[in-house]
Structure formats: C-alpha cells, structure tokens
Image (cartoon, rainbow, N blue to C red):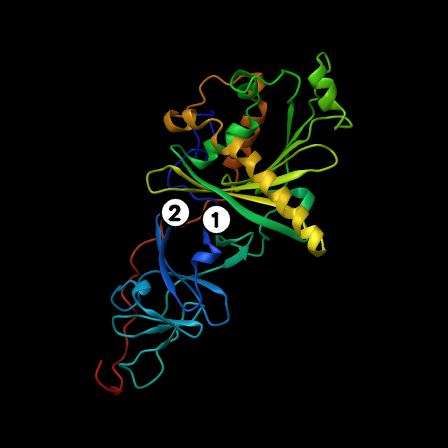
Amino acid sequence: MRSLTDTRVFNRPGVVTHGWYWLARSVDIRRGRVKALRLLGRDLAVYRGADGKVVALDAYCAHMGAHLAEGKVEGNALRCFFHHWRYRADGSCDHIPALAGAPAECIGVNSHVVCERFGLAWLWIGDDASHPLPAPPELVGAEVDSMLANRFEKNCHPSVVLVNAIDEQHFHSVHNLPGSILRMQAVACGTHNMQFRNSGTLPRERWLGRLLARFYRDVLTYHLSYWYGCLGTVTFGPDFLHLHLMFALRQGEAGNTEGQTIVLTRRRRGPLGWLINRAILIATALGARYFAYGDTRVFQSVRFKFQHPLAADASVIAFIRHLEQQPVARWLADAVLPAPAPRITPLRRAGRE
C-alpha cells in the first residue's frame, strides 16, 4: 500500500476478505423451504433440511442453469424444478431421473459452510472454515443470550462504517465528549482480528464527571474487536455491568452497507436470570441505536478519501493497514453461471425426462 488512499481492500467495492458474513435471520429460513438469496454479488439457494441444518448452494443447476430456489426440499437434499436433478447438502448430484445409473461423481454445485448463532445464519467465505464465529472477547467460550436489534443501511462501504467507532476526533467534534475520555490503543490479534482498547478516563473537573467516575475503577470501558473488515463487537458500560453488541456488516449491490445489530449478554440461569437478561439485552439494544444512527448524516453523503492523516488518526490508520494484509477470496470471480456439465456418456434411459 503506497498510501492510505491507494488501498487494495479497504473501501474497495467488490473485494471480499476471508471471513464469516451474515446471510439471513434464522427465523426466515424455514424447515423444508428454499429461498433465493444473494450475498456479495453471488446468487445462492438456501434451505433448511429435515435435520434442521441450513444449507447454502450456488444457485444454478449444473445441467442447464435453472435457479435451484425454484425447486423443492426433499429430506436434506434439494431437487431442481426443471429436470429434477437432486443435490445433496454437500452440493453433489445424487439423482438424475433421465439416467438409469448414478450420475457422474464430478457433477454438482458449490456448497458453502454455514453456521447459526446469535439468531443469524452465517456463511464462511474463503479457505480454512475451521475458524469459530467471533464474539466479544469477554464472552468467548461462555454461554450467551442474544437478541437481534435494529437492521440498517449506510450509503458507504462497510470498512468505512467500522472506522466511525474508532475515530476519536469525531467523538469530540460531533458528540461533544471531553478530550481526555477516549484514547484508543490498537492491537493486532492475528490475521483477521484487531482490537481497540480505550485508555482514557472520565474528567473529574465537574460534578457529572465525578459522579460517573464512581462506576469505573480506572479507564472508561470502551473495547472494540474488529474482524474481516465487516464484523465488529463493542463492549461498554460501568465496571459492574458490561454491555456487549455486535455489528454484522456486508456490502450491498450498490456498494453500500447492509447491517444487522446483535446484542449479547452472559447467560444467567433460572426464571429470574431470564428476566435480568431480557432487561440487559433491551437496554443494550437502546444503546446500540446510538452507534447505528448517531452519524447517519455523514454516512449518507461521505465519499471517504483519507488524504491528510493526523496523529489523532492512529487507530484508523492501524485498522486500514491491518485490513490491507488480510487474504482476499475469489468469491466474485467464481460467482458466474456454472461451466457446462462434464460430458455424460448416454446411458439407458430410465423413462421420459
């Protein structure tokens, strides 16, 4: 990267890094039903099989390119509407009615790794799908309760949306926070992840600052964890109760951002624990609206170009440089109608096609 304006990944439409991307709300994928979905410029046929698992296949049949979402779910497989070719969850074709024998092993469509967590179905793009779905650092490995909050759109790239939450200057200029309250420190935590921790403290010159400072032992809790340039978690709140939220972002068709907010908390047992968790999740969802809508005016008109970086932009610069090193997937390059099916030696017909 020769400069902060000459990037190969950051703020580049059509560039997709390896990572987990939110696909749809789990409740919108019903058992035994297939949906036509489009993710980052690629058409998919997504269904929930009889075993309850979500399957995502490339959308077009390997025979003549019919859209598989026009077909029907049979057990854990999907049968094409056009000539009734049937595809397993792994994308392999296991039945062609016009053939008396089994189809060739090489016939099939791409199947994608999908997981469900936090009320969403997520799809892995890239190599090595063994990476677990991220969570706020304080909740990694813990049982959590979650709730889907607001869904939103921004008229800019997802990586630009993530910049906003680590931009110290705008908290002073737009949100009128005191200058000492946020001092972000960026730490790279592997190829895909970068974390940002606040080292600033509440000012005690005025009574309100002294009152709020009673709820913090030292620094103001504001911790962010960014993944893939499209997924971010935020932890905030007083020392006795940290609140956690996640922003799942993806590029839209027009180069914009389609976002889904998730709020999370550590699971508490019993009926009382359930009530406490619901109250915490609702309170967190209200706080999330501040992050999602606070700077909507900027996101609707910004044409991001980082031409004059300052020392105060250190966290933003660190994020861009880290994102530039992340591997890029061939997602869009492969998102085309399948090549003609391999030549099939005519076999004895099983009946009328």
Q: Is residue 203 visible?
A: no
Q: Secondary structure at mark 1?
A: strand
Label 1: few (<14), some (14–19) or many (≥20) C-alpha neighbours in 10 Å: many
Residue that appears at 58% across and 26% down: 315
* Picture quadrant of residue 270: bottom right
184, 248: nearer the viewer: 248
Image height check: is 38 above or below 343?
above
Q: Amino acid at mark 2?
A: Leu
291, 6: nearer the viewer: 291
Q: Secondary structure at mark 2?
A: loop
Cα distance in 3D space between marks 1 and 2: 9 Å
The label on residue 179 is: none
Q: Position of residue 27 (x, y in %)?
A: 47, 57
Image height check: is 178 above or below 16?
above
Residue that appears at 38% across and 28% down: 300
323, 70: nearer the viewer: 70
Query: Do tag 1 and tag 2 residues touch (Cβ < 8 Å)?
Result: yes
Left or right position of 283 against 101: right
Q: Position of residue 279 (x, y in %)?
A: 63, 43
Q: Position of residue 51 (x, y in %)?
A: 50, 71
Image height check: is 330 above or below 81?
above
Residue named by callout 1: 21
Left or right position of 314 against 273: left
Q: Amino acid at mark 1?
A: Tyr
Mark nearer the N terminus (1 vs 2) = 1
